[in-house]
Image: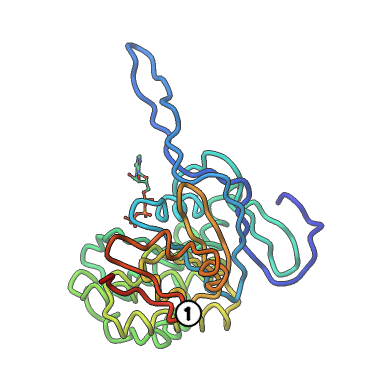
Amino acid sequence: MIDSTSAAGVSRLRLTGLRAGYRHPHRAGLRWRRSPDRIVVDDVDATARAGQVTALLGPNGAGKSTLLRSVAGLQPLLSGSVGWRDPAGVEHDLLRMPARERARRTAVVLTERVDAGLLTGREVVELGRHPYLGLVSRLGADDHRLIDGVLADLHATEPAGQRFAELSDGQRQRLLLARALVTEPDVLILDEPSAFLDVGARVDLMSLLHRIARTRMITVLISTHEVELALRMADRLWLIHDHRLTSGTAQELIDQGLIADVFGTEHAVFDASTRTFGVRD
Ligand SMILES: Nc1ncnc2c1ncn2[C@@H]1O[C@H](COP(=O)(O)OP(=O)(O)OP(=O)(O)O)[C@@H](O)[C@H]1O
């Protein structure tokens, strides 16, 4: 906890003076030396509010996954802090919390394939309750009720009964989202959640994330290449470009010319009036 004087209100995630990237120790003779840091994104000051979906955009290699992993505590920050204000207005330093408490507050769904061995979909989802269990304790009736509710909500009850390894990519993604939700997190972080989904399912997923953010009052932060969809459906955008992050509403980023500049190419041109990309003649 770093401050308890903030006003109560809507909870939110706040990145302050954040620098994310990589630190590679290397061997020089008998000694280990530190190479210069590889800074991917720097000077990040941005806020994502509970009850909203914040979409993280940026071209390939801009640093979306690096930033999300850093915010989730899966790789060390080079500097700065990740704060979370709870509904009572108390500020917490998310990355300095004990690991178990952080695991309850923050749920992360990454794009890496999950090797679930012989587990069923439901057994994978049940893993999301582990931050609440002791070493030898088992899931109780309340845990099972919660899991049933989340699976029904995500229309994932049927695939949950099958072996996880035998499901389609889209079905797996739904179950990984279910696993994240049964943790009952305050902050839900998803790296490219729509990567394996067809176009209708992408829109459905965005609406679902909206509903989850609003009804559960959680902060949803997703990275996506679906720029048009994000412009239409996200409440707020974080755009990484030139190692910096600009945050704003879709209209603000469009008005600044950033969407056109960052994503436009020799052939792809952004039309601000329709908020879509077309092919340059
Ligand atoms: N382990 C690593 N060590 C050093 N540099 C890395 C490492 N992983 C990624 N990078 C570099 O960090 C930069 C950002 O990569 P990152 O995967 O975060 O981008 P991204 O925006 O998620 O890209 P994409 O849209 O293609 O998935 C890239 O230049 C990448 O080469």
Residue 156 in the image, given as x and y percentages of width and height: 33, 83
**On the image, numbered disc 1 is attached to which residue?**
233
Residue 119 in the image, given as x and y percentages of width and height: 25, 68
Q: Is residue 28 left or right of residue 146?
A: left
- What residue is at 74 percent from the left and 71 percent from the top? 9
Residue 254 in the image, given as x and y percentages of width and height: 51, 69
Q: Is residue 160 left or right of residue 31?
A: left
Q: Secondary structure at mark 1?
A: helix
- What residue is at 42 percent from the left and 84 percent from the top? 148
Kindly indicate the quadrant of the structure image that contains residue 116: bottom left
Tell me: is circle 1 under 8 Å from ligand 1. Answer: no
Mark 1: which amino acid?
Met
Q: Nearer the viewer, residue 242 or 215?
A: 242
**Placement of the C terminus among the 4 image quadrants:** bottom left
- What residue is at 39 percent from the left and 52 percent from the top? 62
Relative to 37, residue 134 above or below? below
Q: Nearer the viewer, residue 111 or 106?
A: 111
Q: Is residue 52 left or right of residue 259?
A: right
Furthest-front residue in view? 281
Residue 276 in the image, given as x and y percentages of width and height: 38, 77
